[in-house]
Image: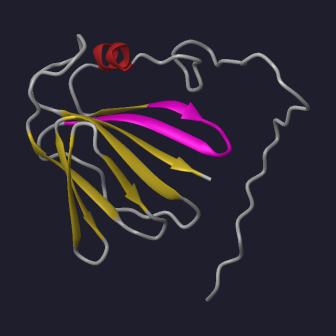
Amino acid sequence: MEQPGTSIVIRDLVTGPIPPRPGVEGSPNTLHTRVAEVVDKMGPPPWSKRVIADERNLVTLIASAPGGGNRPHWHREFDEWWVVLAGRLQWELTGGIVVDAVKDDIVWVPRGTVPGAATTAPKTRSRGPGSRGTDSRGAGSRGG
């Protein structure tokens, strides 16, 4: 059965250049987010913190302990991508494809693909005061 198309509705249109309209400090869409401060505030994994959310973008910082990860899922309307900020992660994708990623790697998962991710190795100390023990951190995003 064919699914109907999905339309993104942008309700906040502008008619020309304007200054940024940042969100409330600590909530999604803060103009400048310091990852190290979020990590310090959130504490040891597991946790996730949404940092950007609008009609076309969704960015979440995620910390997972060794062996931890996300539940397998998939998206019909959008692709998903991840940036590994620390540690080592492994994605098991639909079709038996395995992607091993380390700090500073980007992993792209096309819509319809199941990205089961798990932390596969402890991280070593990384930048920022939030470096605690053995965990991996990444930023996941979807775009329209």
- Does the segment drawn in magenta span residue 59? yes
Name the residue: 14% across, 19% down. 132
Comparing 90 with 46, the one in front is 90
Above or below, 84 against 128 in this view is below
Q: Above or below — where is 24 with respect to 138?
A: above
**x then y, percent, for residue 121:** 8, 42
Q: Looking at the rendering, in which quadrant would you find the N terminus?
A: bottom right
Q: Is residue 2 left or right of residue 101?
A: right
Instruction: Identify the residue at image location x=28%, y=37%.
Output: 104
Query: What residue occupies the far right of the structure in this picture?
Result: 15
57 to 34, vertically: above or below: below
Give the mark count: 0
Residue 25 lies, in percent from the top left, at 56, 12
72 and 61: which is toward the camera: 61
Residue 108 % position (x, y)? 39, 56
Q: Is residue 131 above or below residue 80?
A: above
Q: For the magenta stretch, what is the residue range?
A: 50-64
Indicate left or right for 68 with 55 as reference. left
Q: Which residue sits at x=59%, y=63%?
A: 77
Q: In the image, is residue 2 part of the stretch drawn in magenta?
A: no
For the stretch drawn in magenta, the main secondary structure is strand
